[in-house]
Structure formats: C-alpha cells, structure tokens
C-alpha cells in the first residue's frame, strides 16, 4: 500500500485505511518515510543525469543533422561569449563611453590647445620670409611687438600689439627686421661680371618678450641664396616667432595676515599654532581678469559676548585660533604694465560660524608667472551663544605672493 | 520526421532528442554503470533510431522505441563485455559520500541501484528515470504488466534493505537533535 501510495495509485478508501494504519504503527511510518526519501533521491538523480555535449555533438554530427535554430555555419564559442558579455554590460559600456567623450570635450574646450589661430603644427615648418624692396628704418620695439603687414610695395603698415598673456597658446608673432647687405665689390672685376653663388645666413638676435612663465620663444634661422648679380640691397625680413605658452591655468597664493579686531581685543591669543595668520588660496583663472577657488587659513577672531544667566550678569571674552575655509573670487582691473588692482570676495566659515570677507589690493608682476600681493581685508565672523547671535569684525593687512601653475 | 523534407525531418529529430535524450541516457548509464560506455551506447541508440525510423516508417511509441534500441544495445554490450562495477567507480561514489544529507542520500541510492540485479534494475530505471508506465515497461522488457510492477516493488524493497543501516543512523541522529 505504501508503494502504491507513493506511486499515486491508491484510491481514497485505501488511503484512509493506510493513514489509520500509519497512525498506529511506527514501523510503517518509518517505511513510508524511507519510500519518500528514496523517491526524492530518484527525482534528484534523474534531474542531474544528462548526456554530455560531446555525445550530443556526436549524434548530430554522425547523422549530419543540423539542430533547429542554428545556422549551417556554427558561431564560434568565443565570439558568442564576447557578444553575450557586450550585450550584458551594454548599458555600462555606453554610459562610460558617453561620459568619457563628454569629459574629453569639456577638457579640450577649457584647455583650448590650438589658441587663437588654431595652428599647432610642426614648428620647424614655420620658417618664412618675405622680400620687400621698401626701406624700413624703424627697429623693433622690445616692449611692444611690432607686426609688419605690407599692403603694397611702397607702403608698409606697422602695428603694435600687446604682449600675449594666453595661458595655453600656440601663437605666431610676426615682426620685421631690416636687413642691409652688401656684397663684396671685389667679385666684380670688369665689365664681365663674375657670377658666384653665395649663401647668406641670417640668425635671429635675442629678443625678449613680456610673457608669463613657462613660455618658450623659438627663434628661427633663415638662410637664403643671394643672386650673384646684385651688388647691394636692403629689404625687410618678416620673421615669425612661435610662442608656446604652457600652464594649468591655476594660481596659488600664499599670504601672511595681520589683523586688528573691532572692538579692540582685550586678550592675547589663546594658542599659537603653526602657520597662524597664514592663508593659502588655490584659484582657477577663468580668464585674465577673473579667478575663483578655495581659501584656507589659520586666523584669530576676538570674541566677546555678554548676557544674563540665572540672574547673573556675565561678560565672556576669548581670542582663539580657528581654521577657516571657504570659496573666494578675485577680479582684477586697472592693469598698467606690471601692476594691477583687484578686489577679492570670500564666503566660508569655521567651527564658530560663518565668515565673510572683502579685500582690496594690488598685484605687482616684476616677471613672468609670479606676483607680489598687498591688500587690505575686512572680515566678519558670526557666532551664536544661547539664543543670540554675535558678530566680530576685523581688518587685516595681507601680504604675500602668487604663482601661476 | 519520416515524411517531411530534410529540414523538417531534422527539426523533428531535434525535438525528439530534446524530449527523450535525458531519459535514454539515464537508462543506459544506470544499466551499464559507466559513463564512457553509456556515451557510446547512447549515441548509437539515437543513430539507429534515426535510421530505423526513416527506413521502417512505422508508427510506434517514440520513447518505447528508443528504450528498446538502447536496451538491445546494452544487452549486446554486456554479453560481449564483462559487466562489473569498476572499483574506481565505487570508490568515486564513496569518496563523494560527504556533505549535505540529500547529497549523501543521493549517492547511496545510486550505489544501491548499481547493486541491484539486472532483472530488478531495468524495470526500476524505466519506471523511475523514464517515467514509463508498467504497460510500457512490460512491452520493453517482454514481461507482463503485473510482473513489471512486482519487479519495481521488489527493486525498491531491496534498495531499502541496502540502505537500512544508513537510514537508521540518520533517524537516530534526528531524534537526538530533537
């Protein structure tokens, strides 16, 4: 009966009879349990047995039968796995590709490696010279870079442009240099002119430009074969100097600060940490006149607040040191040669509360890529005690240097 | 498969293979006890099925026909070869006697089947691994349906006797855990 029950062949009446027997007989229950366990093992075993892939291939291959759904040319397993992986991770692949492309576009737009004229080709091939018969007596101004454009053989237009301050630029600066040459008259002996070939070389003289640091000026050598039937001549040689400007477009500022608190501090500094009253700023130069970045500094704020607590009037004073951090923006204006003014705003905070600042100063650039800074700054710290807000202003003198990275 | 074009015939054979290959392989493997031998007989079974079906054009139970072919091949093989359970197979079975309870039971059931006499093993395998009715088993084994049922029952009883010591230990452990 147990075997028939497990086989599913028992009718209802016999099932009821079996169940009543099972309830009274433990050995029968053990036997039923064994039968069920065996049937379960049979089922598991049957599910785990399958012909091997080699056997399947052997069957179909021997018969020349193409399994349904497959083409006559089977797809290699490796390619199938590759395409499967691509399909599985297609979203990740597409998203990463778009992200990489967008990042590359943004970086290229910011860096603008081609500068204004878009010509960043081989520097060695930019040698050029123009021959003009018009005399030019004015020499190049080393402060301003002259550009000569010959609109006709008789008239020459001279332009002067300001030095280039591009962060990253491949730029050609054209200038003309007057050349006067004389060929040795000894070559001409009689009416029959002796023709000789001579080669004249022109080497660029040292020229200095007012340019930011990390710039290179490539001078160009020019050589020319002079016709042998000319005794003397003068001409203007058009020379192109390549200016390669490099840099990250980031400026680092290191400043020392000295502050005066309002009201005047009644206490000395509570601590004297390393780099106290020192600030460091890293700013990205959006253009020649505007920069923005972060500002970190160790500074003191004199704090004084009064109040009444438990009918006791108190007056609390302290002069602690804080590490302040925030965002800063600088706008340059009134530029004169190596000098310019600026205003700089700051918004940040420290553990006591938010801090706002405004600075006016000047930058002096004796050379390329660095400046001396001098400025006056007003700061305000807002802090609270209990339910009240207190404010502590101060005025600071800033002095330091900045470097273009 | 018998009357259609080559493409239709291949599609029909593929469908038949998908449906019955596992059962045929299970039968061959259980009867012979060796996977390598089973692979050969299994492939030969379907090759003969394909050729005989196309040639004879008879209407018959596909599963029964397949099992019949496999059975005859196994009998021929066993008549020609020495049919012993190889020692390394047994060691393999015992070596895998570890792990979870179900896995242990599975391995022991496989061992118990291998120890069955052929006259009991064959009906049991056809019933358990191929799901054949007792009538089909009787037709294949050339016995009566009642006899087929009896053989299956006796096969299970014999397996229970073989597994009795193990099952007793398992139940004792279960009782102790409670």
Image (tube, coloured by chain):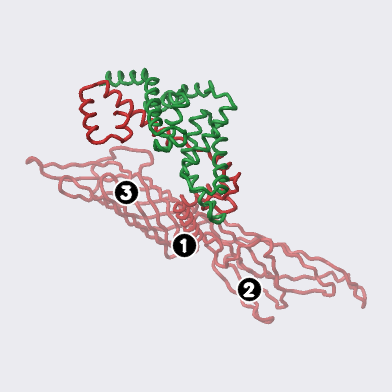
Chain colours: A red, B green
Q: How far separated are the C-alphas under marks 3 and 1?
A: 30 Å
Q: Residue at x 68, y 75 (%)?
A: A136
* Residue A124 coordinates in the image, percent (x, y): 68, 61
Badge 2 and badge 3 both on one subunit: yes
Badge 2 and badge 1 both on one subunit: yes
Q: Residue at x 36, y 42 (%)?
A: A276
Q: Name the image quarter holding residue A272.
A: top left
Q: Is residue A235 above or below residue A397?
A: below
Q: Is residue B77 above or below residue A103?
A: above
Label 1's element? loop
Q: Name the image quarter holding residue B127.
A: top left
Q: Residue at x 50, y 37 (%)?
A: B68
* Residue B148 coordinates in the image, percent (x, y): 41, 31
Q: Which mark is residue B159?
A: none
- The residue beneath circle 2 is A148
Q: Which mark is residue A259?
A: 3
Q: Nearer the viewer, residue B49 or B149?
A: B149
Mark 2 vs mark 1: in front = 1
Badge 3 and badge 1 both on one subunit: yes
Q: How many marks?
A: 3
Q: How far separated are the C-alphas under marks 2 and 1?
A: 27 Å
**Is A380 displayed left or right of A224 in the figure?**
left
**Sequence-wise first label, 2 or 1:** 2
- The residue beneath circle 1 is A288
């Amino acid at each position: 009966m147990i075997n028939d029950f497990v086989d599913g062949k028992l009718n209802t009446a016999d099932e009821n009879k079996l169940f009543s027997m099972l309830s009274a007989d433990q050995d029968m229950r053990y036997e039923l349990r064994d039968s069920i366990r065996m049937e379960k093992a049979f089922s598991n075993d049957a599910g785990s047995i399958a012909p091997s892939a080699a056997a399947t291939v052997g069957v179909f291959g021997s018969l020349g039968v193409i399994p349904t759904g497959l083409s006559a040319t089977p797809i290699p397993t490796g390619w199938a796995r590759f395409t499967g992986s691509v399909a599985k991770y297609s979203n990740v692949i597409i998203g990463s590709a778009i992200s990489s492309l967008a990042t590359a576009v943004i970086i290229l737009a910011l860096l603008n490696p081609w500068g204004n004229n878009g010509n960043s080709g081989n520097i060695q091939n930019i040698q050029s010279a123009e021959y003009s018969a018009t005399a030019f007596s004015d020499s190049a101004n080393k402060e301003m870079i002259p550009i000569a454009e010959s609109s006709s053989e008789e008239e020459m237009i001279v332009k002067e442009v300001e030095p280039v301050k591009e962060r990253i630029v491949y730029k050609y600066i054209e200038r003309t240099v007057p050349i006067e040459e004389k060929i040795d008259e000894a070559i001409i002996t009689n009416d029959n002119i002796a023709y000789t070939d001579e080669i004249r070389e022109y080497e660029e003289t040292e020229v200095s430009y007012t340019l930011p640091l990390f710039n290179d000026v490539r001078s160009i050598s020019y050589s020319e074969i002079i016709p042998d039937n000319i005794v003397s001549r003068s001409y203007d040689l058009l020379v192109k100097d390549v200016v390669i400007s490099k840099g990250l477009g980031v400026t680092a500022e290191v400043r020392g600060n000295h502050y005066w608190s309002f009201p005047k501090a009644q206490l000395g500094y509570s601590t004297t940490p390393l780099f106290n009253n020192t600030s460091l700023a890293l700013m990205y130069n959006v253009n020649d006149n505007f920069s923005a970045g972060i500002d970190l500094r160790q500074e003191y704020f004199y704090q004084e607040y009064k109040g009444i607590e438990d009918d006791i009037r108190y007056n609390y004073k302290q002069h602690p040191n804080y590490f302040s951090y925030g965002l800063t923006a600088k706008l340059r204006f009134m530029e004169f040669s190596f000098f310019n003014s600026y205003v700089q705003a700051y918004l940040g905070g420290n553990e006591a509360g938010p801090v706002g600042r405004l600075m006016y100063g000047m930058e002096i650039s004796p050379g390329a890529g660095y400046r001396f800074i001098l400025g006056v700054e007003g700061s305000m710290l807002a802090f609270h005690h209990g339910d009240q807000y207190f404010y502590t202003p101060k005025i600071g003198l800033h002095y330091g240097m900045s470097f273009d990275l | 498969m018998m009357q259609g074009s080559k493409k239709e015939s291949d599609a029909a054979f593929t469908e038949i293979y998908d449906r019955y290959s596992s059962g045929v392989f299970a039968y061959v493997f259980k009867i012979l006890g060796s996977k390598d031998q089973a692979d050969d007989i299994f492939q030969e079974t379907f090759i003969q099925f394909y050729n005989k079906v196309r040639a004879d054009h008879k209407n018959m139970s596909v599963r029964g026909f397949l099992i019949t072919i496999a059975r005859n091949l196994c009998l021929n093989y066993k008549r020609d070869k020495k049919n012993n359970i190889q020692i390394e197979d047994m060691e393999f079975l015992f070596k895998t006697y570890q792990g979870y309870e179900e896995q242990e039971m599975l391995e022991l059931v496989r061992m118990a089947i291998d120890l069955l006499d052929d006259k009991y093993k064959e009906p049991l395998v056809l019933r358990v691994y191929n799901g054949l009715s007792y009538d089909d088993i009787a037709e294949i084994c050339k016995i009566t349906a009642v006899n087929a049922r009896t053989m299956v029952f006796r096969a299970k009883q014999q397996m229970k006797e073989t597994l009795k010591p193990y099952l007793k230990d398992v139940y004792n452990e279960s009782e102790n855990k409670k």
